Image (spheres, helix red, strand yellow):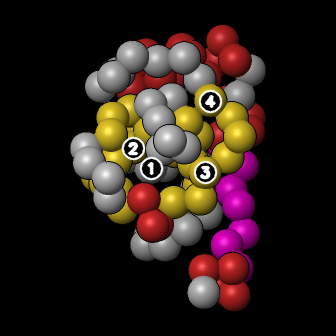
């Protein structure tokens, strides 16, 4: 299952489109709980449809329901803070 806890994803729709986030919990087969953290990427902790996410090969080691501080520490330990700050250009053709 690619939508696993700790997986880094890119939001492809909505006001946060193009921003990276981290999956902190899997709610069911259609929804996951994601966070930026907001201070780092601008993505606040919220429920997201898996159809609105593009998954990356990067994964960090966090526990289920990790706080934003724990996610931030894990990102720093993995050396991914600059990677998370960069925004991705979302192409509309790629969503179809």
Distance of label 1 from label 3 (alpha carbons): 15 Å
- Foreground residue among 67 and 30: 30
Residue corresponding to mark 4: 59
Distance of label 2 from label 1 (alpha carbons): 8 Å
Point out the tag, 2 or 4, that comes first from the N-terminus: 2
- Foreground residue among 51 and 48: 51
Q: What is the secondary structure assignment of the residue under circle 3?
A: strand
Give the answer, above or below, for where 91 lies relative to 52.
Answer: below
Distance of label 3 from label 4 (alpha carbons): 10 Å
Bounds of the magenta segment: 85-91
The nearer-to-camera label among 2 and 4 is 4
- Judged by its main secondary structure, the magenta piece is loop
| Residue 89 horizontal side relative to residue 8, left or right | right
Q: Are marks 2 and 4 in contact (CB under 8 Å)?
A: no
Q: Quadrant of the C terminus?
A: bottom right
The residue sitting at 61% across, 51% down in the picture is 55
Occupied quadrant, residue 54:
bottom right
Residue corresponding to mark 3: 55
Q: Are marks 3 and 4 in contact (CB under 8 Å)?
A: no
Q: Are marks 1 and 3 in contact (CB under 8 Å)?
A: no
| Residue 28 horizontal side relative to residue 15, left or right | left
Residue corresponding to mark 1: 43
Where is residue 57? Give x, y as percent: 71, 40
Residue corresponding to mark 2: 34
Is residue 63 within the magenta segment? no
Distance of label 3 from label 2 (alpha carbons): 12 Å
């Amino acid at each position: 299952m690619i939508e696993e806890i700790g997986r880094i994803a890119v939001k492809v729709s909505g006001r946060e489109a193009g921003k990276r986030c981290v999956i902190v919990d899997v709610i069911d087969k259609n929804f996951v709980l994601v966070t930026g953290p907001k201070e780092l990427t601008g993505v606040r902790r919220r429920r997201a449809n898996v159809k609105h996410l593009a998954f990356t090969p990067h994964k960090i080691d966090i526990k289920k329901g990790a706080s934003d501080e724990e996610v931030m520490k894990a990102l720093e330990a993995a050396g991914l803070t600059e990677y998370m700050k960069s925004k991705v250009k979302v192409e509309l053709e790629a969503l179809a």
